[in-house]
């Protein structure tokens, strides 16, 4: 299984996963043109993508769902409530390209199994995904206010994670956002802070875990260097083998990570 985080941040999110039989995306939160360009950065063609899995209806995750379905013939998977919430925002999609996948279900695509799980976020019915191929697993979790014990149990000991570190607590508190928005971000249906992300990661990573991508960083309330330092320091303090047993990797809102093989 090969993976690239094409874009991750408050402005848009797209992740690419490839197996010998399938090429898929999780989320499409940028324009089709931008996603096409990011695919070419890693030497891949958007016309070859066969499936798109949508986590929730927010624009930074679903902006070009309709475009990818109509222009590139991509099959789209989302749960029933997310389909309804996307509605007219994504335009008409051919019925034979629309598929429902509810939280807790597994969609098998030949050599790739996509397992969905619910999260706590202020969307209508948000869910994220763990992808399985040939004994390897990759978890994407970038929009949740907290990680429950049940959620942690589902995603424990994956080979790689794309994990939310949305904001630095002090930057958010001192920043220009209105108090109502700050409360939303800090609440149980908001986003994980750098500290929350580190704490949750220490609950779920295991001996198989080799790579952790830090994702969905706020462009106003975080910095890559700060998120990386916070997570690495907190884990090192608890005697986790940072940069020895596993590597912490940064993501970018408009630049793809290199294509990596799990």
Image (cartoon, helix red, strand yellow):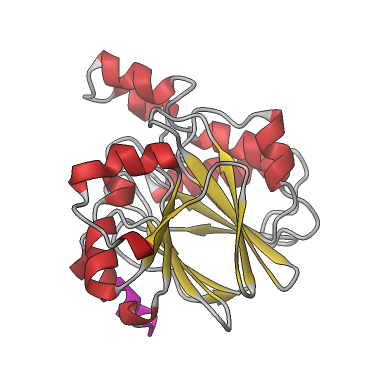
The residue segment tinted magenta is 38-44
Looking at the rendered image, the quarter that the N terminus falls into is bottom right
Looking at the rendered image, the quarter that the C terminus falls into is bottom right
Q: Is residue 258 left or right of residue 19?
A: left
The quadrant where residue 46 appears: bottom left
Residue 140 visible here: no
- Which residue is farthest right? 207
Residue 165, percent across and down? 48, 41
In the image, 250 versus 130, the foreground residue is 130
The correct choice, above or below, for 99 with respect to 193 in the image is below
Write the residue at 73% across / 62% down. Answer: 244
In the image, 75 versus 221, the foreground residue is 75
Residue 8, percent across and down? 38, 54
Q: Is residue 89 rendered magenta in the image?
A: no
Residue 201, percent across and down? 65, 42
Write the residue at 69% across / 62% down. Answer: 210
The correct choice, above or below, for 171 with respect to 93 in the image is above
The correct choice, above or below, for 152 with respect to 122 in the image is below
In the image, 101 versus 194, the foreground residue is 101
Write the residue at 44% across / 30% down. Answer: 121
Q: Is residue 99 left or right of residue 57?
A: right
The quadrant where residue 256 appears: bottom left
In the image, 51 versus 176, the foreground residue is 51
Q: Is residue 175 left or right of residue 153?
A: left
The correct choice, above or below, for 234 with respect to 256 in the image is above
Residue 83 visible here: yes
Residue 49, percent across and down? 39, 75
């Amino acid at each position: 299984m090969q993976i690239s985080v094409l874009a991750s941040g408050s402005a848009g999110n797209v992740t690419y996963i490839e197996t010998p039989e399938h090429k898929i995306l999780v989320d499409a939160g940028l324009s089709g043109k931008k996603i096409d360009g990011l695919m070419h950065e890693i030497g891949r063609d958007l016309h070859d993508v066969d499936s798109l899995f949508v986590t929730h209806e927010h624009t930074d995750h679903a902006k070009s769902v309709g475009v990818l379905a109509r222009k590139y013939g991509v099959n789209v998977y989302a749960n029933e409530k997310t389909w309804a919430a996307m509605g007219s925002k994504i335009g008409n999609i051919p019925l034979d390209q629309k598929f429902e996948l509810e939280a807790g279900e597994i969609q098998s695509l030949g050599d790739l199994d996509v397992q969905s799980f619910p999260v706590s976020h202020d969307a209508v019915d948000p869910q994220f995904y763990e992808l399985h191929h040939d004994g390897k697993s990759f978890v994407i979790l970038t929009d949740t206010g907290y990680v429950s014990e049940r959620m942690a149990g589902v995603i424990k000991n994956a080979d790689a994670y794309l994990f939310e570190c949305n904001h630095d607590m002090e930057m958010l508190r001192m920043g220009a956002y209105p108090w109502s928005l700050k409360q939303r971000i800090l609440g149980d249906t908001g986003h994980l802070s750098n500290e929350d992300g580190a704490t949750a990661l220490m609950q779920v990573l295991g001996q198989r875990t080799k790579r952790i991508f830090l994702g969905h960083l706020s462009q106003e309330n975080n910095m890559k260097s700060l998120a990386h330092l916070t997570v690495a320091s907190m884990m090192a303090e608890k005697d986790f083998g940072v940069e020895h047993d596993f590597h912490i990797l940064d993501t970018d809102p408009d630049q793809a990570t290199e294509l990596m093989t799990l």
